[in-house]
Amino acid sequence: MSIKNNLLNIKTTLPEQITLVAVSKTKPVSDLMEAYDAGQRIFGENKIQEMAEKWEQMPKDIQWQMIGHVQTNKVKFMAPFVSLIHGVDSLKLLQEINKQALKNDRIIDCLLQIHIAEEETKFGLDDEELSTLLSSTEIQELKNIRIVGLMGMATFTDNKDQVKKEFTHLKSVFDTIRSKDALQSFSILSMGMSGDYQLAIECGSTMVRIGSSIFGGR
Ligand SMILES: *Cc1c(COP(=O)(O)O)cnc(C)c1O
């Protein structure tokens, strides 16, 4: 199967309102261009330097999204162009993104990463950290970032019931924040990857991050 066919097959199965992020980490620009030529304009990368190199080489109508863990000292390298940062899990990181966005005269959209998996190793906020962060006065002062939703990764397991439970929990956190309406333009729920995106969509995802099913294994 070609990248183009993989992409088009996935697109035909996705409901219209679901945003597809093509996760192109580790893949060469030639592979990304194949997806681009098939119409894809949103790409996800997990290393800032790699994303910046691809941004320089590729057409400028691409939306580049950072899906990996973000090191504070590297935010400046993506601040000029990044369209969405998925993995935000601290006030310190938000403050740095705000600072770099201001320098570039931009407002940068961010998703807060929530810890929903069982594994200890995955990054993200727990429920209490999330509410502390959202109610902090510091966050109100950040005029060059916009928190537009949540992101989460389920446990890496074949147990569908567990994954479903984790996605459902994330959706309920998302709905709770949305119902309070404290944040304007809070509308993105980024959950689901190659192995679990159909389940994620059933559970209320609005954005799926798909890599290996489009570009092949890494
Ligand atoms: C790599 C990655 C993906 C894509 O994973 P696939 O299983 O290849 O679809 C999605 N989200 C994050 C955060 C990733 O790091």
Image (spheres, helix red, strand yellow):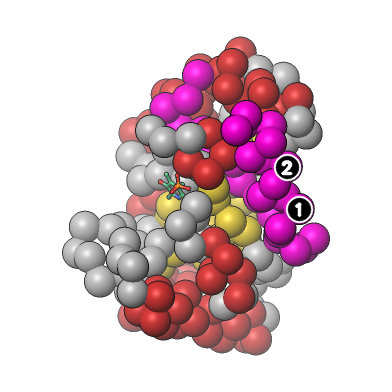
Q: Is residue 118 above or below residue 197?
A: below
Whether residue 26 is visible, yes or no, is yes
Residues in magenta, as a range: 1-28
Whether residue 135 is visible, yes or no, is no
Q: Is residue 64 above or below residue 20?
A: above
Determine which quarter of the picture holds residue 141: bottom right
Which quadrant does the C terminus fall into?
top left
Residue found at x 73% / y 42%: 8
Q: Secondary structure at mark 1?
A: helix
Q: Is residue 26 magenta?
A: yes
Q: Image check: 210 left or right of 132?
A: right
Residue found at x 21% / y 57%: 121
Residue 14, image x, y percentages? 71, 59
Residue found at x 78% / y 34%: 39
Which quadrant does the N terminus fall into?
top right
User: Which numbered circle lies on residue 12?
Assistant: 1
Q: Secondary structure at mark 2?
A: helix
For badge 2, the amino acid type reads Leu
Residue at the extreme front of the image, as rendered: 1
Query: Front-most of 111 and 136?
Result: 111
Determine which quarter of the picture holds residue 182: bottom right
Residue found at x 80% / y 60%: 16
User: Which numbered circle lies on residue 8?
Assistant: 2
Query: Label 2: how many residues lie within 10 Å, few (<14), some (14-19) or many (20+)?
Result: some
Residue at the extreme left of the image, as rendered: 120
Mark 2 and mark 1 in contact? Answer it, CB < 8 Å: yes
